[in-house]
Amino acid sequence: MSLRVGVIGTGMIGQDHIRRLTKVLQGVEVVAVNDIDENRATAIAPEGAKVFTSVKELIHSETVDAVVICSWGAAHEEQLLECIAAGKPVFCEKPMVISEESALKVLAAEVAYGKRLVQVGFMRRFDADYRRLKAVIDGGTLGTPLMYHSTHRNPSVPEGLYTSDMPLNDTLVHDADISRWLLSDEIDAVEVRVPRRSTRGGELRDPTIVLLHMASGAIVDVEISVNIAYGYDIRGEVSCELGVAALPNRPATVISDQHGIRQAIPEDWRERFIEAYDQEFREWIAAASAGTATGPSAWDGYAATLTADAALRAVTSGQREPIKRISKPDLYN
Ligand SMILES: NC(=O)c1ccc[n+]([C@@H]2O[C@H](COP(=O)([O-])OP(=O)(O)OC[C@H]3O[C@@H](n4cnc5c(N)ncnc54)[C@H](O)[C@@H]3O)[C@@H](O)[C@H]2O)c1
Ligand SMILES: O[C@H]1[C@H](O)[C@@H](O)[C@H](O)[C@@H](O)[C@H]1O
């Protein structure tokens, strides 16, 4: 029997996930949708899916086995808590939540429930190139990882919707998560440096350089650029004691003409991570069909939120901001 899914939030990524859940993947159907913009939900709802005007009713509906949350970050806490209260597996787009307080509430609810229900949308962990990079680091042939250079460039971000904290609490969270995962480490402190501002983003603080001090002593530097015009460019290079392992640029046709030799750069995250999102959902469907979750957990969402909070403090203080974590509940070991 197919997993019957309700999707909350039918904007850019909600539409892309509905496409993959209805047209690409097996063993799943979208039976319900909701958006605060009811007209949008109605326009996007796949054939046969019910449009719910109440999130709560969608989550508790007997016709819905599992939930996909694609609303804005600030709405995630309430929606996640409702899914846990209903005992339903839930895939939640990143950021899991946007404050430490919210993250602790989600952790406490899931721990009290006693089983993993929450999977956070850190899709890089499902990308074949990142998985190969991790296999090399874990294989140990390059020795201990010492530094990781993470480059995260967006051509542009939605004007008005992408606000001043978001380079750190919406974009950096991917680099925080992938650094913890690649290096099998935790982030203990954060520093931020703000160079000359790009005029392309108006008043938005952009670009930003972030240093993540890992518990092991390794250091990660992250470039966050969210208005760099030329494309969606994601890079990563791990410097180890005996060598360096880097993420390849996306393979693309090589064009030679009067302008020189060139390769296309992905336009946005949809293009760059298309296979990663598919794989992320393949694994989620399998886990949710068994009543649970897999991959990035609420603990990982919590760790990314702590990093974003510390980075936001570091912008103001100009100092190295320490991170204090609760001890890890057994559920996440
Ligand atoms: N993993 C990724 O690479 C990736 C890519 C894009 C977006 N995202 C994340 O997905 C989420 C949505 O991003 P987007 O780009 O699709 O934004 P968007 O603005 O295009 O769409 C968000 C939709 O959610 C709806 N919405 C907002 N609050 C709601 C609520 N309380 N209840 C129901 N609907 C609500 C909005 O009306 C809108 O239609 C964000 O958390 C974003 O960070 C992740
Ligand atoms: O919501 C998007 C998405 O998470 C992308 O993967 C990231 O590159 C963007 O910076 C962010 O705004």
Image (tube, rainbow, N blue to C red):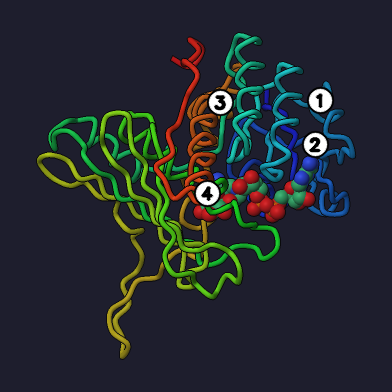
Gap in Å between the C-alphas at discs 4 and 3? 19 Å
Q: Earlier in the sequence, mark 3 or mark 2?
A: 2
**Residue 180 placement (x, y as % from top left):** 38, 34
Q: Nearer the viewer, residue 199 or 5?
A: 199
Gap in Å between the C-alphas at discs 1 and 4? 37 Å
Tell me the residue at 32%/58% (across/down): 249
Q: Quadrant of residue 120?
A: top right
Tell me the residue at 47%/15% (across/down): 327
Residue 298: give its label: 3
Q: Is mark 4 within 8 Å of ligand 2?
A: no
Q: Are marks 1 and 2 in contact (CB under 8 Å)?
A: yes
Q: Is residue 156 left or right of residue 128?
A: right
**Residue 166 placement (x, y as % from top left):** 59, 52
Q: Residues within 10 Å of mark 2 (few under 14, many from 20)?
A: many
Q: Nearer the viewer, mark 4 or mark 2?
A: 4
Residue located beneath label 2 in the image? 32
Q: Using the rendered image of the protein, determine whether residue 23 is visible from the camera's viewpoint.
A: no
Q: Are marks 4 and 3 in contact (CB under 8 Å)?
A: no
Q: Nearer the viewer, residue 11 or 323?
A: 323
